Image (cartoon, rainbow, N blue to C red):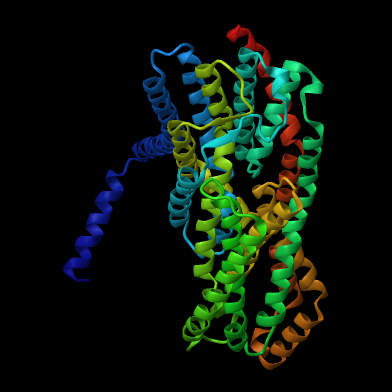
Amino acid sequence: MTGRAQTDIFRREILMETKKPTLDKDLDKIAYVEEAAGMLARSYVAPGLALLFIILVVVVATAFVAGETGAWIIVAAAAIGGYMALNIGANDVANNVGPAVGSNAMTMGTALIIAAVFESAGALIAGGDVVGTISRGIIDVDAVSDKNIFIAAMMAALVSSALWINLATLIGAPVSTTHSIVGGVMGAGIAAAGFSAVNWPTMAGIAASWVISPIMGGVIAALFLYFIKEKIIYQDDKIAASKRWVPVLIAIMAGTFSTYLALKGVKALIRIDLSTSLLIGLGVGLVTWIVTRPLIARQAVGLENRNQSIRKLFAIPLVCSAALLSFAHGANDVANAVGPLAAIVHTVEAGDVAAKVSIPLWVMLVGAIGISIGLALFGPKLIRMVGQQITKLNPMRAYCVALSAAITVIIASWLGLPVSSTHIAVGAVFGVGFFREWYTEKSQKRMAYVQSHEAHNPSKVIEPKDRAEIVRRKLVRRSHFLTIISAWIITVPAAALLSGLLFYPMAAVLK
């Protein structure tokens, strides 16, 4: 035995003699406690930063309204509005970037940055300076003409909708911000002036959209996925098929989003009718097709003849779609979210109740910045839900979801239907998932393609048990489906009930 080996044995013996089991156990316990304390501290970071934002909102609001009569009401409403904006960011923005994240077209960090920038840009650039204070005519202004009753109703609507969205985020259910506010306004209006104050035809239209918009989004997404599978994925020469059809699909997306933004995203800057928006979209789509044909042809050079190669061609369009959806969402939904706050500010300062009011810049900033902060702090949970946990998405499926969202909004605008972007996007994800279930089992073309390739590649033959497991993992998760549908159904009545209960103490305080 060498001298070095003897030295190593001697050292090990000394360590064994000096090791104290009791001391080691105590040290392990201390390490566990430190680790648990660290995890607990990290869990309080996001709520702490959210609370800091609300405090800053209070400070800013105080600076703008200091010395005015009823300033404390505006400050309190601003704090509630900030809380509402945080919850919108945590829940509603997931629909815009979730599919792109779930398909690995972008990372979570990139998605958060893109969504925050474009949500804020949409709110501040095209968010509009006028908003309907009664959330699309849900209740009659004359029924709540007393300013204190009106302020109490708007405060109750803000608090109830924010609390409901917060609860939905905790249980992992993406819900409609607009429907939450509608429910809050309706409940407060009923509490303030009875059922006759509610515009029931408008409510009936909103209720119809619960069913129409997700089904429409799901069907459109499924149709595009069917086209991609038939024309590209299950073709012997996937690359040649991609060079032919991917430029067409990208052109359709570019044209659709141009129409969508012309119709909805910039309506505060310039009013463009549907026919003009369609012409703009057609022109942009044609130009995009001409430009992308040679680009896709060059990008396809050297790619292997497999699905993984095709997915790379859809990555950039998905990033662009996430940015455009976020911009349009900021332009449209942020104004609705801060509408009750703007209504309170106007009523306190002007002393009257108006059906439409201007949104002060600082109020819009509360909405825009609050949504961005809420997205960064709490958004990843719902982004993963929409992008990964409902069904498995890849770039082609995520493309279908994003395109379906834009097309459905355009069709709904043409039909005059009040729809929810949340319901459309999540409905499109469900549509893609359920279509894959049907197509995997029923498609003769797919079965012939699989059998043909298994015959030529015996090493890649999948055992029936394994194939069943793979199919099972691709199915829509029923537990998430039931949770989300249940949350959609009860959003308006839950927000209305909570708002009605909150109205009475708030009205008592403002008397």
* The C terminus - image quarter: top right
Q: Nearer the viewer, residue 185 or 386?
A: 185
Residue 76 on image: x %, y %: 50, 19
Q: Quadrant of the N terminus?
A: bottom left
In the rendered view, would you say 409 is above or below 143? below
In this orientation, does residue 275 appear?
yes
Residue 166: x percent and y percent?
Answer: 59, 34
Q: Quadrant of residue 252?
A: bottom right
Instruction: Say which of 182 and 231 sits in front.
Output: 182
| Residue 104 showing in the rendered view | no
Extreme residue in the left direction: 3
379 left or right, relative to 37: right
How many numbered marks appear?
0
Find the residue positioned furthest to the bottom: 456
Residue 504 on image: x %, y %: 68, 13
Query: Residue, x 65% and y 49% (percent of image)?
Result: 421
**Camera-side residue: 95 or 132?**
132
The image shows residue 411, relative to residue 173, as above or below, that is: below
Q: Residue at x 34, y 37 (%)?
A: 23
| Of the pair 150 and 399, the residue shown nearer to us | 150
Considering only vertical position in the picture, is 255 above or below 19? below
- Look at 60% across and 57% down and name the residue there: 260
Where residue 44 appears, as percent x and y from the top left, is: 44, 33
